[in-house]
Amino acid sequence: MQKHIFFLYPLWFGELLFSKEEGKFAVKIARNVIEKYVKDEEITVKDYPESFTKKSGVFVTINTYPKKELRGCIGYPEPVMRLIDAIIDSAKNACQDPRFRHLEENELNSIVVEVSLLTKPELIKIDKPKDYPEKIKIGRDGLIAEAGFYRGLLLPQVPVEQEWDKETFLSHTCIKAGLMPDAWLSQRTKIYSFQAQVFSEQSPNGEIIETTLEQQDL
């Protein structure tokens, strides 16, 4: 059963707002890189938008089709390189996500590609850790948990797909960082939030749409 609820909130993204055409182009680039990479062919990308020369965070997700099960998801949460380079690198690495076996050529017609274009993560400022749930919105925010060398991220899509409330989302972000589920209640744990514009194929090499998640109060 479909769990997504889609609705566009363009003001979420502040300084980072991509057009639908740019989002679709990002998915096409990622799909092309994935296909070339698994076929061991030369990867070249030309004539990309000027906005892709700016540094930006991005994640490339590969899902199976039609079941939409995760097959790989890799990216850069921070704007550390040009968006075009981050898309290319993330797409290649998503093919060999260490959680799964490497993507093979015979799977290319049974996967769909999704690209999440990210805002810069911002530290959530709170008086006490119990205030974190008041500062986040399910369907709007992605989260990063950080404590020392431990760091983990979950995209905004995840809590909606999993039907988590805010506390569960915080706990699973800590688990992703290799921390205890209640680590977000510790003063030594930092929690960052970010937003994403999500563009995804509806079928293999098919129509690409922007699928921004509706705000939830869970």
Image (cartoon, rainbow, N blue to C red):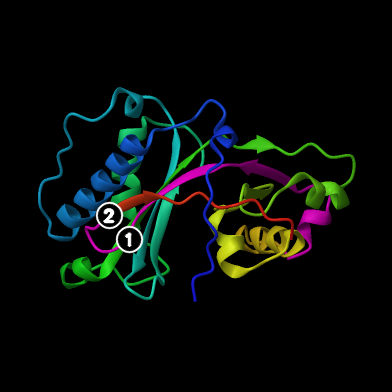
Task: Tell me which amino acid carries mark 1.
Answer: Gln
Whether residue 76 appears in this view of the structure is no
Whether residue 15 sits left or right of residue 216 in the image: it is left
**Which label was assigned to residue 171?**
none
Q: Secondary structure at mark 1?
A: loop
Q: Residues within 10 Å of mark 2 (few under 14, many from 20)?
A: few
42 to the left or right of 131 = left
Q: Is residue 95 magenta?
A: no
Residue occupying the point 28% across, 66% down: 111
The alpha-carbon separation of the residues under discs 1 and 2 comes to 6 Å
Read off the residue under disc 1: 202
Q: Residue furthest front?
A: 7
Say whether residue 27 is visible. yes
Question: Residue 139 location in percent, x, y?
Answer: 61, 53
Observer-nearest of 77 and 25: 25
Earlier-in-chain disc, 1 versus 2: 1
Dot 1: few (<14), some (14–19), or many (≥20) neighbours within 10 Å?
some
Percent x, y for residue 147?
A: 70, 49
Residue type pointed to by label 2:
Glu
- Write the residue at 18% across / 29% down: 47
Residue displayed at 52% across by 54% down? 6
Q: Are marks 1 and 2 in contact (CB under 8 Å)?
A: yes
Residue bounds of the magenta highlight: 180-206
148 on left or right of 110: right
Quarter of the image for residue 122 reads top right
Residue behind mark 2: 207
